[in-house]
Amino acid sequence: MEPRVSLITLGVADLSVSRAFYEQLGWQGQETEETVFFQAGAMVVVLWGRAKLAADAQLPDLELPGFRGVALAHNVRSEQEVDQIIAAAEQAGATVTRPAGPTFYGGYAAYFTDPDGHAWEIAYNPAFALDADGSITLPPGFGEP
Amino acid sequence: MEPRVSLITLGVADLSVSRAFYEQLGWQGQETEETVFFQAGAMVVVLWGRAKLAADAQLPDLELPGFRGVALAHNVRSEQEVDQIIAAAEQAGATVTRPAGPTFYGGYAAYFTDPDGHAWEIAYNPAFALDADGSITLPPGFGEP
């Protein structure tokens, strides 16, 4: 199994509400068969009805009031960009669960949840440089003893 | 907010168990401060204690017996590759929730959950070609009315 992720599918309660949320943040969805696809760099983020997604995976669907055990991170190039995106997300209806501030790793970040409770961290991490195309590459020697 | 995901962090119960699972599948982890990072194409997959991740996001941590509302997909180039990866995942201790078989979109796929219940789809989708480096790009005109 090669080390890569092709798609992340987020289960949603109302496709149009969730699509509008991400489009208000500047993403451009492409919809087919009640599924919305966003090209996201070298991969694709998908919105799909959560009951359908659970059935597709043959997993029991449950209402989840809290943390899902997964966080997506969107890294940016400055603290100011964190503040700007968090302000835009709040305007789009996100819930900011952790206000922007310094992080334990020497960066600056905030978390919000989208209309379906999916957690996003918006982070400036000076140790993780972004390439021109937004790709992220672990620094040489990172994590070595 | 640019359309990209920098990191996906999976909350885990036992870091060494979860790291061993992904390494048995061929991924190479880099560990620092009780966190394991896997370079995954243009992004990074991270394993971190789920209580720590919940606290970091300032979200209530809950035991989740079923579907998390999120599925990660790993697309491959043939039906045979789906079968091979599913067999390897089972050997590594995954639970296959949906056996390999034809999909509604004309492909071939299976789902498994990792030691922490995170859902992965291994899929061959002839409509979504993979680039040489494993990147996935939506076909031109995809999702247009």
Image (tube, coloured by chain):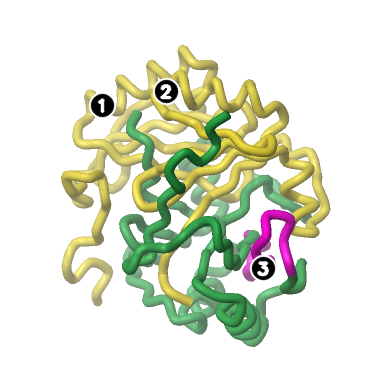
Chain colours: A green, B yellow
Mark 2 residue type: Leu
The residue tagged 3 is A108
Q: Which residues are magenta?
A: A102-118
For the residues beneath circles 3 and 2, the answer to whether they share a chain is: no
Q: Is residue B124 above or below residue A28?
A: above
Specify whether residue B120 is painted magenta.
no
The chain under label 2 reads B
Q: Amino acid at mark 1?
A: Glu
Q: Which residue is mark 1?
A: B81
Q: CA distance from mark 3 to mark 1?
A: 41 Å
Left or right of A27? Residue B127 is left
Question: Which quadrant is home to the N terminus of chain A?
Answer: top left
Secondary structure found at label 3: strand
Front disc: 3 or 1: 3
Residue A107 in the magenta stretch? The answer is yes
Around disc 1, counting alpha carbons within 10 Å, would you say few (fewer than 14), some (14 to 19), or many (20 or more)?
some
Task: Specify whether disc 3 shares its chain with disc 1.
Answer: no
Which secondary structure lies at badge 2? loop
- What's the distance in space between the residues labelled 1 and 2, CA to CA? 13 Å
Find out whether the residues at labels 1 and 2 contact each other: C-beta distance under 8 Å. no
Q: Quadrant of residue A73?
A: bottom right
Q: Using the image, determine if residue A23 lies above or below residue A98.
A: below
Q: Position of residue B102 (x, y in %)?
A: 29, 34
**B98 or B39, nearer to the observer:** B39
